[in-house]
Amino acid sequence: MRGVEYRGLVRVEGPVVITGRGRNAGFNELVAVYGRDGGRRLGRVVDMSADWTAVQIFGSNTGLSAEDSRLEFLDRPMELRVGKGLLGRVFNGLGEPIDGSGDIFSSEFMDINGLPINPYARTYPRDFIQTGISAIDGMNTLIRGQKLPIFSGSGLPHNQLAAQIVRQAAIIKPERQSGEQPGAEPSGTASAPGEAPFVVIFCAMGVKYDAARFFLDDFEQSGVLANVAVFLSLADAPSLERLVAPRCALTAAEYLAYRENMHVLVVMTDMTNYCESLREVSSIRGEVPSRKGYPGYLYSDLASLYERAGKIKDSTGSITQIPILTMPNDDISHPIPDLSGYITEGQIVLDRELFQRGVYPPVAGLPSLSRLMKDGIGPGMTREDHKDLSSQLFAAYSKVRQLRNLAAIIGEEELSAGDRRYLRFGETFEQQFLSQGETENRSIERTLELGWLALSELPRDELLRVRKEYLEKYLDPLMQLPP
C-alpha cells in the first residue's frame, strides 16, 4: 500500500539501503528514510527485484540500522519548486535554498528527471552567439541551443574561460529562420543596447569552495548576479548529491526556457566529479564495470543530461549548455571526454602547451570543433567570408604543427623559406588571433580582421580554400598597408 511506512532494512551498504520491496514502488520514486535518531533523510529508488528494493540516500547514513530504521515511499519522483523567484538565489545540490531567504514563492513543482523531448518538436539551432572570444567565434562558433563542452585539465583556466563567456556572450540578431516566431528577439549577456540578457544557471558538482566563490564573485562584479540561479554541491557535500545537482539545475533551466520563454545558459562544472560519483554508486550496487570501472550506462546517463539542451517549437526560449570537464591526465580518449564528444555538438579543448607559453585562452586549434558552426555563420549571421577564412586558418595551422615537429628534429634553419613563413604565420595566429585578455571582448568583425592579418603572412597562392573575391576584398587591402 502507498503511504504506509515499512519498518526494518535488509542491510545498509554505504549510501544505499536495501529493503523488502514496497508494493507498487517505482523507479526513481522519492523515499523518506527515518533512523533511530529520528532524523529524516531523503532518497530515491535506484534498483528493484521481485524481493527487494535498493534506495539511494542523499546524505549521511549515520544513525541508520537494519532493525530500527523506517522507510516511507512518497508516491512521487524527486521534484524542484520552480518559479521566477529561482533567479538570484543559491541552492544546494538537492534544490534546497541555502542563502537564508527561505523557499521561493511558488506552488509549482517539476520532476527533476525532465520529460523526453519529441525530436519532431525540436527546432534546429541556427542563431550565432558572439562570445567575444576569437578562438570560439572565429573557428568554433557557439550556437544558441547548442551543447558545447570545455575539455580541460587540472590547473588550466577553464573556469576563467567559462566566466568570460557568461559575461560576454551576445546573440547577433539573425534573419528570421523558418519555424521561428515572428518578432522573437535574440538575447545575450552582453551589454548590447536593446538585447535582453541570458539568464544563467550555474551548477557546481564536487568543486572546491574557491572555484564556486570565483564564479559567484564574477557574476556579482559583472552585474549579472540577479539573473543567475546557482546550484552548489561542493566537495564537502555528500557525493551522491552530485548526481542530483545537474538534474535540478536543468529542471530550473527548462522552466525558465520553455515556460517563461527565456534564453538560458547552463554552465556545469565539473562533469568528471559527476561521473566519479556515478562510478561510486555503481560499485556499491555491485554492477559489472565497463571501461576504467565506470558503469556501462555512462553514455546514456550523460546523454540524459546533455540532451536537455536545445530549442523547441512553440517556445521562443532556448537552453545552451557549456559543461566543463577535466580530462584525467589530459587524456582526451578517457571515457568521460570520449563519450561526451559523441553526445555533444563539438568541444572546446584547452591545450597545456599553449597555456605554458602564456596564451590565453589556450584553445587548441585542431582538436576543437563546433559541429553546428556551418549553420550559424555566413551572410545575415556573421559575414560572407567567415566559412572560407575559418577553413583556411585550420588548414594552415595544421601545417604549422607538422613543421614544428619537423623543425624539432632537423632544426628551423634547415627549413625552406616557404616553411619559415608558415612558422611566422603560426606565431602571429597564436599571439594575435588566439591570445586575448580575460576582459577583452572582440566583435566578430575584429575577429575576422585578425584572421586575415594572420593569413597575410602566407603566400597568396597558398590560400587555396578562400574564394578569389574574398582575397581581393579582405586580404589585398591588408597587403597594401605600410609595414
Image (cartoon, rainbow, N blue to C red):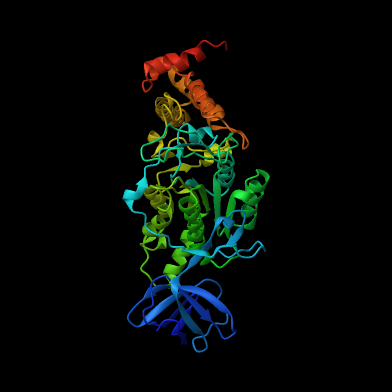
Question: Does 466 appear above or below 405?
Answer: above
Judging depth in this view, the residue of 420 and 276 nearest the camera is 276
Question: At x 53% / y 42%, what residue is drawn?
Answer: 352
Judging depth in this view, the residue of 178 and 58 nearest the camera is 178
Q: Quadrant of residue 40?
A: bottom right
**Residue 72 in view (yes/no):** yes
Question: Does 401 appear above or below 331?
Answer: above
> Can you say which quadrant of the picture contains the N terminus?
bottom left
Question: At x 39% / y 20%, what residue is drawn?
Answer: 463
**Residue 416 in view (yes/no):** no
Question: Does 50 appear above or below 46?
Answer: below
Question: Does 323 appear above or below 80?
Answer: above
Q: Position of residue 20 (x, y in %)?
A: 40, 84
Q: Quadrant of residue 196?
A: top right
Question: At x 57% / y 57%, what residue is drawn?
Answer: 86
In the displayed structure, does residue 374 sit left or right of residue 441?
left
In the displayed structure, does residue 238 sit left or right of residue 24?
right
Q: Position of residue 39 (x, y in %)?
A: 59, 80
Q: Position of residue 202 (x, y in %)?
A: 56, 53
Residue lying furthest front in this view? 182
How many numbered circles does the render carry?
0
> Can you say which quadrant of the picture contains the C terminus?
top right
